Image (cartoon, grey):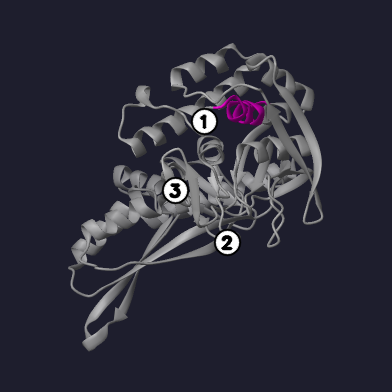
Amino acid sequence: MTVCYFDAFSGLAGDMLTGALAGAGADQAAITAAVHSLVPEAVVSFEPVLRRGITATKFRVAANQPAKHRHLSGILKMIAAADISETARDRASRVFQVLAEAEAAVHGVPIEKVHFHEVGAVDSIADIVGTAVGLDSLGIGRIYCSPVNVGRGLVNTEHGMLPVPAPATALLLRGKPIYSRGPALELTTPTGAAVMVALASEFGAMPPLRIKAIGYGAGDNDFQEHANVLRVMVGEPSGAVETTTVSVMEANIDDASPQLIGYTMDLLLEAGALDVVIIPAQMKKNRPGVVLQAIADPEKREELAALLFRETTTLGIRFYSAERRVQNREWIPVLTHWGVVRIKAGAHGFAPEYEDARRIAEVSGMPLKTVLAEAAHAYLKDKSSRNSE
């Protein structure tokens, strides 16, 4: 599978996305043809520019049409009529669906009543369709995105001056890793945010890649602080140890029963926490307590924090980001005397799946330790047999 990683250190915008993909080798003629199928009179260009010494591609669309307010249904009809692949059509439609849901929530109206203002012009529609066609041209099957620089200050919108990130952008990026750095400008637009939220599989550290191509999409401004570009790296999964960004949350608790703590631990794991540990601690005034620590994907942070506040007596939670390195692993079923147990196997170790072994132990009456040992023996025997072939 071909994958790509967008490095949004200077934010996300639709023209930067399309420009970055074009710079990485996406078919510019196909993107141009797609835009022309939407707006025949549009003038499309891919201009090489410099941003702090880096050569980047500036994607421009001039349609010579007045900006219009468009509803989601009208935009989806335009996309449906465009001369693009089904994959590109589906991606572009998903982006606008996600964007419309955010705008509806911000303005407190039904989704069918949403008017697209800043993103309603033809050039913005072309940015989204151009990005979808660029991804299709490069054969991208999976998309990753870095933490997103949203910018700072104020942005001038049809509704007046609003803080950065704009309300729709902030809502779209809820639960995603974001930060603010650089000039007092909007660096991430609702369009750019919607594309990543709709299409990216993960936000965080770069996945292990064998890089085949790199592209830079230019923003309008040339900042002094940093190169105003969006970088995309295109390649294939390398099979190396995976490094991801995770959120760690901790709460000190000294006034809850062990039953409540254990129950909360189970709920956190069921809700998607990657791991939960209970650490004995001696609290202030010499009270015995625990530190409840949960590790989660960044997009799960707010959901799990709400659960932690709801189910425990804590009044505060600490958050910090950490790197998590995970070996590539696979599930291998092995046959024991009492049934099948899955083995989680990596390059440097393996472990029988506890729940499988526990179920067999309960049904068969065998000790759990015996089932685990038998599953491990069966795995090693099968592995040795495979290696000798």
Write down the residue under mark 3. 161
Numbered label attached to residue 120: none
How crowded pointer 1 is (Cα within 10 Å; few <14, some 14-19, many 20+) is rated as many
Instruction: Give the foreground label among 3 and 2.
Output: 3
Three-letter amino acid code of the residue under disc 1: Val
Residue 359: % across, % down? 34, 44
Residue 80 magenta: no
**Earlier along the polypeptide chain: callout 1 or callout 3?**
1
Split into 4 quadrants, where in the image is the C terminus? top right
* Position of 375 relative to 24 (above/below): below
Q: Residue at x 68, y 45 (%)?
A: 220
How many residues crowd around disc 3 within 10 Å: few (fewer than 14), some, or many (20 or more)?
A: few
N-terminal-most mark, 2 or 1: 1
Using residue 348 as the reference point, say whether residue 138 is left or right of it.
Answer: right
| Residue at left offset 73%, top offset 41% | 234
Q: Secondary structure at mark 3?
A: strand
Please tell me how crowded label 2 is: few (under 14), some (14-19), or many (20+) other residues with Cα within 10 Å. some
Please identify the dominant SS of the magenta region. Answer: helix
Q: Nearer the viewer, residue 152 or 243?
A: 152
Observer-nearest of 376 and 234: 234
N-terminal-most mark, 3 or 2: 3
Residue 366: percent from left, percent from top: 34, 50
Residue 125 on the magenta span: yes
Magenta range is 121-133
At 65% from the left and 31% from the top, the residue drawn is 131
Q: Which residue is mark 2?
A: 181
Q: Is residue 367 visible?
A: no
Q: As shown in the figure, which amino acid type bears the numbered disc 3? A: Met
- Give me the C-alpha separation between circle 3 and circle 2: 20 Å
